[in-house]
Image (cartoon, grey):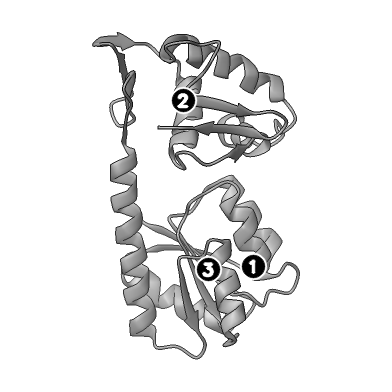
Amino acid sequence: MTRILVVDDEPSLVRTLSINLRARGYDVEHAFDGRTALQSVVDSVPDLIVLDLGLPDIDGVEVIRRVRAASEVPIIVLSARHDSDDKVEALDEGADDYVTKPFGMDELLARVRSSVRRAASDAAHAATVHTPDFTLDFVERRATRGGSVVRLTPTEWQLLERLAATPGRLVPQADLLRAVWGPGYEREAHYLRVYAAGIRRKLEPAPGHPRYLLTEPGQGYRLRV
């Protein structure tokens, strides 16, 4: 079931959205402030976020920025801000759509359906990674190199899945550690060094000069495919 996180500080609006979304088969969670929303994303990334910009603690644009540092989950902004500069800033920071209040429920639901479809299509394309040297099938968890099967550990698969979700983009160390090992491991950078070295030995044509799994010293890693 598609899980939607509704982030807004208006209880009546959250209630209305929840009723309408649940009536159409969505699983709905809610947060009334930015910190709760960010913690919810850390605990379990939703399939879609509907986000108000005028939150009582953290501005919605900052919430978008922090979510985008770790996830490509679709974000639909739902805001009373009509200024074009606010819209441009939200979209530049990574929002996928922008709906102004007041809004029509049918229009919002159509945008939700569209965002969910796009996300499903993107996920299908990311299910397999092909390079000139190896192939990764994340559905079957099957890796091949030069026609031979390469055995990766469950942790190596988790690390590669997180990187492959945003191919070519830098994923910060703390986000990788939290996604693979869980909250509380954000400072254990040596875990990443050990596992990255193991993955390179198995997949890279020249592990000492990696072509695909790249390190940005002190920042994070990226998977170039």
Vertical order, 50 against 1 (above or below) = below
Single out the mark in the foreground, 2 or 3.
2
Q: Nearer the N terminus, badge 2 or badge 3?
A: 3
Please tell me which residue is depicted at 55% across the width and 10% down the height of the picture: 208
Please tell me which residue is depicted at 60% across the width and 34% down the height of the picture: 176
Alpha carbons under labels 1 and 2: distance apart:
32 Å
Q: Nearer the N terminus, badge 1 or badge 2?
A: 1
Alpha carbons under labels 1 and 3: distance apart:
9 Å
Q: Looking at numbered disc 1 in the image, what kind of residue is underneath it?
A: Val
Single out the mark in the foreground, 1 or 2.
2
Single out the mark in the foreground, 1 or 3.
3
Please tell me which residue is depicted at 64% across the width and 69% down the height of the picture: 60
Q: Position of residue 64 (x, y in %)?
A: 60, 61
Is 84 placed left or right of 166 in the picture? right
Residue 212 numbered mark, or none: 2
Where on the picture, by quarter, is residue 96?
Answer: bottom left
In this view, the residue in front, 211 or 33, is: 211
Residue 61 numbered mark, or none: 1
Where on the picture, by quarter, is residue 187?
Answer: top right
Whether residue 107 is visible to the viewer of this picture, yes or no, is yes
Q: Which residue appears farthest toward the bottom when viewing the image?
A: 102
Is 127 placed left or right of 38 in the picture? left
Pointer 3 residue:
91
Q: Looking at numbered disc 3 in the image, what kind of residue is underneath it?
A: Leu
Vertical order, 77 against 40 (above or below) = below
Alpha carbons under labels 2 and 3: distance apart:
29 Å
